[in-house]
Amino acid sequence: MADVRLPGTLTPLFPGLPRRVEVEAPTVLAAIDSLEQQWPGLRDRLVAEGPTLRSHIHAYVDGERAALDTPVEERSRLDVIAAISGG
Amino acid sequence: MPKNMLTVATRKGTFVLESDDRRDWKLRGPYCEGWPVYHAIYDPTTGEIYAAAASEWHGSAVWRSADLGETWEMSSDGLTYGDEDGRKVSKVSTLARAGDRLLVGVEAPGIFESSDNGKTWSLLSTLSGQHGSEEWDDPANQPPGHLGISGFVTEPDNSDRFFAIVQGVGAFETEDGGSSWTPRNKGLRRDWPADYEDVGFCVHKLVRSADPERLYQQNHVGMHRSDDQGRSWNEITEGLPGDFGFAAAAHPHDAETFYVIPVDGGHGRTMHDGKAAVWRTRDGGSSWQDLRQGLPQQNAHLGVLRQAMTIDSHDAPGVYFGTSTGQVFASADEGESWSEIASYLPSISSVDVAVLD
């Protein structure tokens, strides 16, 4: 199971969504889609048309910058970050 | 006594102001998790509040509250052009109720509809085929602010008939619920060359009056009036301090009375001379009076956006506007005198009023 860390801006939008959750998925997109099953609407908050990660959402797999098709291993850590931006 | 409620959309969430007497107001919020909210409305059909919002991080969605703002849900289910289309929904700009449908205007220009009060959405129209529609889908041609569809004007007794404004292009009317559209820009002034006769106008705000035949319009270069349901327009700017503005409101019982807030048409886009004023006509635009009592008259560089002025339905209607610097001003006497009822909100995008029994 991959260890997924989610941004703090996401959890208030979905009751019961923890900051840290385990999922089994082969790619970043599959991991997000897995979370979508439990928290409908979550995918839209991270993924734009394309599909592509939203412009201010970054993903890292085991510390390396990742895209939606980046593989996720059994024991990977997937960090989903809301970029430091805005004002 | 009815409760008066203002729904205020801001750069950092939605707020609610409430008053029993239109004198003392109480503020609640912020709601919608501090997302930038472009337009928020109270819908008397459902008793719900809807807020069109677009987070820099998490994209566009319509928030809804069934308990006057105490709790909220949001959805963007179906609010997309899809992965293959090429256009993106970068912003949800404006909301309106049309019969049993809720409408939301988006950027890139398009209209989505919901038949379940905002839970799910589907594309109604992109106004494709209209002159200029190929160009307005090009991100390089999008005007500053990128609102796309910047406003609707619906008709109370005919939900199939409504106007939609395409920012920087003009007003269009549908009479069949959104299947077909007709430009309604005849007679409008424009001070720039254009490729087409019927589009290429910068309509900021379109308002229905108490007379079904009459509409008012503030655009980039002047105030205009139509006495034939938008089929033709005549300019009524003379007497105002300038031809530029965004916000406008029509008296609910008197078709001759109309309010507008002129602002500097340059880059500043704040009220003229640093003195706050609302301008009112009582004769359909033949003459204008400035209303200043209670409004700041020194160093008041206030901007007011297109959805940020509204008027209530009382016999002596109250007028309200919110500023880009976070103040809300209210008048309970048709604009004769004003008071500041909120002072330190984030930049205000829209103000909507409801009188609740």
Image: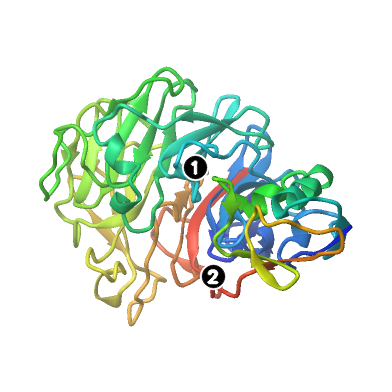
Which residue is depicted at the point 42% across and 23% down? Answer: B161
Mark 1, residues whose alpha carbon is within 10 Å: few (<14), some, or many (≥20)? few
The foreground one among B301 and A65 is A65
Tag in front: 2 or 1: 2
Report the residue marked by disc 1. B315
Which x, y percent locates residue B186? 18, 32
Picture quadrant of residue A38 = top right
Is residue A70 toward the left or the right of residue B284 in the image? right
As drawn, A66 above or below B38: below
The colour scheme is rainbow
Dot 2 or dot 1, earlier in sequence: 1
Mark 2, residues whose alpha carbon is within 10 Å: few (<14), some, or many (≥20)? many
Question: Marks 2 and 1, Cα distance to the nearest angstrom?
Answer: 31 Å
* Secondary structure state at the residue bearing disc 2: loop
The foreground one among B343 and B349 is B349
Q: Which mark is residue B346?
A: 2
- The single residue placed furthest to the bottom in the displayed view is B299
Q: Quadrant of the C terminus of chain B?
A: top right
The foreground one among B329 and B73 is B73
Q: Chain of mark 1?
A: B
* Secondary structure state at the residue bearing disc 1: loop
Q: Chain of mark 2?
A: B
Q: Amino acid at mark 2?
A: Pro
Which residue is depicted at the point 49% across and 23% down? Answer: B159
Which residue is depicted at the point 21% across and 41% down? Answer: B200
Picture quadrant of residue B279 = bottom left
The foreground one among B162 and B33 is B33
User: Do marks 2 and 1 both belong to one polypeptide chain?
Assistant: yes
Q: Amino acid at mark 1?
A: Asp
Is residue B120 toward the left or the right of residue A50 in the image? right
As drawn, B322 above or below A41: below
